[in-house]
C-alpha cells in the first residue's frame, strides 16, 4: 500500500531539518579549525551546534514538534484531518503545481521545513500579485532610467479561519537583457501556472473573491469580519 501523504511529509521535514543541522555543524567545525577561533569559543560552538541538535533529533520521534501537527490541528483532531487528506490524495484526482497540491477540499503548500494547509471552503480572498524587478546603472552626474530585469508572479490565498495561515505561492522570472522569444515564453508559462492555481480554487469554491483592489485590501486589513461577511453573503444568495 502506498505510504500515506502526511506521513511522507513528516519524514521529508525531519530529513530536511537533520540535513540543516549537519551542514551547520560541519560549517561551525570548519570555521573553528580554519579561522582561528579559540578553544573557549570552540567549546561553545560544540555545545550549541552538536549537543543541542543531539537532544533536538531525539525529539523528532514525536510528530507534535512539527508544524504539520499545528497546520492540521486548525481543522480538528490531527489524525482525523490527516486521514481525510490522505484519502483525497489517494483518490488520484488532485492536481499539482510544483510544491502546491490541490485536492477536492484542500490546498497544501510543501515548504522546506513546514506544510501550509487551507481548507478550500474557507477561502474568502485569493488573487494574483505581480512584482516587477528593476535595475539601473548608477554613475556620478548621470540619471539613467531603470530597466525591468524580471518579474515575480505570486498568488495570495486568505482564509476566513483566523488561525489558518495566509498562503503565498510565487515564482520568479528573470529576463535581464535577454528579450528572446524563448525567455518571453518562459515568463508567460510561469504566470499561467499561477493563474491555473486560481482557476482550480475557483472551480472548488466559486463564492470567494478572486481579484485584487486597493479597496478590498483596505477592508481586509481594517475590518476582516466585514470582509468575510461580504463574501459569505454572496454564498447565501
Image (tube, rainbow, N blue to C red):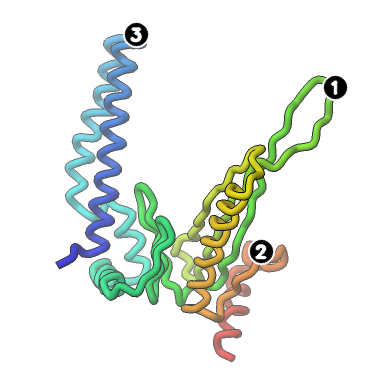
Front-lying residue, 192 or 50: 192
Q: CA distance from mark 2 to mark 3?
A: 53 Å
Q: Earlier in the sequence, mark 2 or mark 3?
A: 3
- In the picture of the structure, the residue carrying the numbered disc 2 is 217
Residue 218 left/right relative to 5: right
Mark 3 Cα within 10 Å, few/some/many (few <14, many 20+)? Answer: few
Q: Residue furthest right?
A: 141
Percent position of residue 229, x then y: 59, 79
Disc 1 crowd rating (10 Å Cα; few below 14, some 14-19, many 20+) is few
Q: What x and y, as percent, mark residue 101?
A: 39, 64
Judging from the image, what secondary structure is the residue with disc 2 in? helix
Looking at marks 1 and 3 on the same chain, the residue that comes earlier in the sequence is marked by 3
Q: Residue drawn at (59%, 47%), measured in percent from left and top? A: 183
Element class at badge 1:
loop
> Mark 3 — residue?
36
For the residues labelled 1 and 3, the Cα–Cα distance comes to 45 Å
Q: Residue at x 62, y 58 (%)?
A: 129
Which residue is nearer to you in this view: 144 or 33? 144
Which residue is tagged 1? 141
Determine if residue 48 is in view.
Answer: no
Quarter of the image containing the C terminus? bottom right
Residue occupying the point 69% across, 64% down: 218
Residue 150, position as x, y percentages in the image: 63, 44
Dot 3 falls on a residue whose secondary structure is: loop
The image shows residue 98 at horizontal and vertical percentages of 42, 56
Residue at the far bottom in the pictured view: 237
**Disc 2 and disc 3 in contact, CB within 8 angstroms:** no
Crowding at mark 2 (Cα within 10 Å: few <14, some 14-19, many 20+):
some
Q: Nearer the viewer, mark 1 or mark 2?
A: 1
Given residues 233 and 92, the one toward you in this image is: 92
Amino acid at each position: 500500500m502506498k505510504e500515506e501523504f502526511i506521513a511522507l511529509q513528516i519524514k521529508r521535514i525531519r530529513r530536511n531539518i537533520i540535513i540543516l543541522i549537519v551542514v551547520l555543524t560541519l560549517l561551525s567545525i570548519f570555521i573553528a579549525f580554519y579561522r582561528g577561533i579559540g578553544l573557549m569559543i570552540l567549546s561553545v560552538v560544540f555545545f550549541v551546534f552538536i549537543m543541542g541538535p543531539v537532544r533536538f533529533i531525539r525529539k523528532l520521534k514525536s510528530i507534535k514538534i512539527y508544524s504539520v501537527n499545528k497546520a492540521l490541528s486548525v481543522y480538528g483532531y490531527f489524525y482525523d484531518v490527516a486521514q481525510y487528506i490522505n484519502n483525497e490524495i489517494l483518490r488520484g484526482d488532485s492536481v499539482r503545481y510544483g510544491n502546491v497540491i490541490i485536492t477536492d477540499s484542500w490546498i497544501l503548500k510543501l515548504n522546506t521545513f513546514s506544510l501550509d494547509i487551507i481548507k478550500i471552503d474557507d477561502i474568502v480572498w485569493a488573487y494574483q500579485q505581480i512584482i516587477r524587478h528593476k535595475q539601473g546603472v548608477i554613475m556620478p552626474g548621470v540619471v539613467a532610467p531603470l530597466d525591468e530585469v524580471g518579474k515575480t508572479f505570486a498568488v495570495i490565498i486568505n482564509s476566513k479561519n483566523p488561525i489558518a495561515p495566509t498562503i503565498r505561492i510565487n515564482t520568479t522570472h528573470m529576463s535581464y537583457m535577454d528579450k528572446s522569444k524563448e525567455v518571453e515564453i518562459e515568463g508567460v508559462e510561469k504566470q499561467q501556472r499561477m493563474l491555473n492555481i486560481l482557476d482550480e480554487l475557483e472551480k472548488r469554491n466559486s463564492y470567494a473573491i478572486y481579484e485584487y483592489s486597493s479597496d478590498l485590501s483596505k477592508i481586509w486589513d481594517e475590518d476582516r469580519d466585514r470582509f468575510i461577511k461580504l463574501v459569505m453573503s454572496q454564498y447565501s444568495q
